[in-house]
C-alpha cells in the first residue's frame, strides 16, 4: 500500500470518528434528559427524541416516557408515538388505555386511532358522553372554556404546556413544548412555524435561511425549532453549526440540537 493511499485512509477514518463523536454525545444527552429528575426536562427530551422518527433506539426511549412516573410525561410519550406513527408501539399504547390518568388514556386512544387501531374507542366514547373527567389540559381543557383560553395568552400557554397533544404537537406543529419566553416575543410563534414549514421544501435558499437563523435568533425556543428543521434539511456539514448548542442552558434547544445531530450523522457520506 503506497503512502498516499495510507494518508487518504487515515483522513477518511478521522472524518468518520469526528462525526461519530458528536452523535455519541448527542445520544448521551437525550438519554440523560429522559432520566432527569425534572419532569419538564423529561418532556422536552421525549419530544426531541420523537423528531428522530422510527429509529429503533428513538422508539424505545419514547416508549420509556410512556411509563414515566409523571402523567404529563406519559401523555407526551403517547402523543409523540402517535406523531411518529410508531405501529410497533401499538401494544404499549393499548396498555396506556388503562393508565390512571384520563389525559393519558385519551392521548393514547387518539394516537392509536390515527394509526388505524380502534382499541381506544371506548375511551373516546366515554369522553363524548362526559364520563371521563375533563380536567385542565384534557381535550384542550374542554370546549366550554377553549375560547377563553385562546383569548388569554397565559391560559393558552398553560394549555400548551399541560396538553401534550396541543397545537405544538399537531399537524404543522413546531415540534417543541411551549416555553414562557414564547409569550414574551409576539413574533416567536410565527418564526417557529415558518421554520417548520420551510423545512418541508429543502432547497438551497431555505437551508441558508435556517443556517443563518440558527446563528442569529435570540429566542431559544425558536432556535430549537430551527435546529430541528436543519436536522431535517441539512447535511453532515451542519453538525458543526449545531454542536455548540449541546451545552445550551435551554432544555428544548439542547435536546433538539442533539436529535438534529443524530439525524445528520446518519446521512450518507
Image (tube, rainbow, N blue to C red):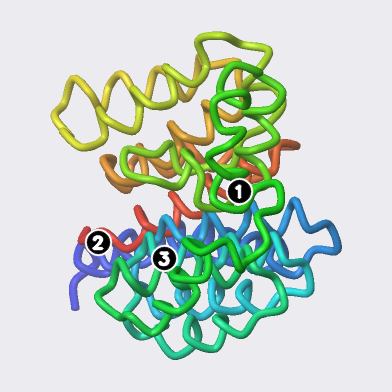
Residue at 52% x, 70% y is: 126
The image position of residue 19, as x and y in percent, is: 42, 58
The residues tagged by marks 2 and 1 sit, at their Cα atoms, a distance apart of 53 Å
Residue count near mark 2 (Cα–Cα under 10 Å), binned few <14, some 14–19, many ≥20: few
Direction from residue 23 to residue 245 in the image, left or right: right
Task: Report which residue position mark 3 lands on.
Answer: 110
The residues tagged by marks 2 and 3 sit, at their Cα atoms, a distance apart of 53 Å
Residue at 72% x, 78% y is: 100
Tell me the quarter of the picture where residue 267 sits.
Answer: bottom left
Task: Report which residue position mark 1 lands on.
Answer: 163
Task: Report which residue position mark 2 lands on.
Answer: 8
187 lies above or below 175? above
* Residue 33's disc number: none
Direction from residue 136 to residue 114 in the image, left or right: left
The image position of residue 203, as x and y in percent, is: 13, 29
Q: Which of these two is toward me, 10 or 63?
A: 63
Q: Secondary structure at mark 3?
A: helix
User: Circles 2 and 1: CB distance less than 8 Å?
Assistant: no
Residue at 39% x, 77% y is: 121
Amino acid at each position: 500500500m503506497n503512502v498516499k493511499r495510507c494518508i487518504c485512509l487515515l483522513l477518511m477514518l478521522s472524518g468518520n470518528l469526528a462525526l461519530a463523536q458528536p452523535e455519541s454525545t448527542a445520544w448521551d444527552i437525550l438519554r440523560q434528559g429522559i432520566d432527569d429528575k425534572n419532569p419538564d426536562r423529561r418532556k422536552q427530551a421525549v419530544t426531541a427524541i420523537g423528531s428522530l422518527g422510527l429509529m429503533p433506539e428513538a422508539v424505545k426511549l419514547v416508549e420509556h416516557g410512556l411509563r414515566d412516573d409523571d402523567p404529563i410525561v406519559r401523555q407526551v410519550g403517547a402523543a409523540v408515538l402517535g406523531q411518529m406513527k410508531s405501529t410497533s408501539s401499538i401494544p404499549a399504547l393499548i396498555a396506556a388505555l388503562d393508565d390512571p390518568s384520563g389525559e393519558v388514556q385519551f392521548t393514547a386512544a387518539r394516537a392509536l386511532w390515527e394509526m388505524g387501531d380502534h382499541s381506544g374507542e371506548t375511551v373516546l366514547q366515554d369522553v363524548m358522553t362526559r364520563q371521563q373527567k375533563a380536567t385542565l389540559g384534557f381535550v384542550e381543557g374542554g370546549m366550554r372554556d377553549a375560547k377563553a383560553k385562546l383569548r388569554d395568552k397565559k391560559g393558552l400557554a398553560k394549555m400548551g404546556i399541560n396538553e401534550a397533544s396541543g397545537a405544538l404537537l399537531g399537524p404543522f406543529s413546531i415540534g417543541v413544548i411551549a416555553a414562557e419566553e414564547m409569550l414574551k416575543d409576539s413574533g416567536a410563534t410565527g418564526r417557529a412555524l415558518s421554520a417548520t414549514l420551510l423545512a418541508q421544501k429543502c432547497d438551497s435558499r431555505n437551508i441558508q435561511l435556517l443556517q443563518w437563523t440558527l446563528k442569529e435568533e435570540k429566542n431559544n425556543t425558536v432556535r430549537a425549532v430551527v435546529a430541528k428543521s436543519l436536522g431535517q434539511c441539512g447535511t453532515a456539514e451542519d453538525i458543526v453549526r449545531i454542536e455548540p448548542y449541546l451545552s445550551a442552558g435551554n432544555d428544548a434547544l439542547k435536546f433538539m440540537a442533539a436529535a438534529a445531530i443524530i439525524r445528520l450523522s446518519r446521512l450518507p457520506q
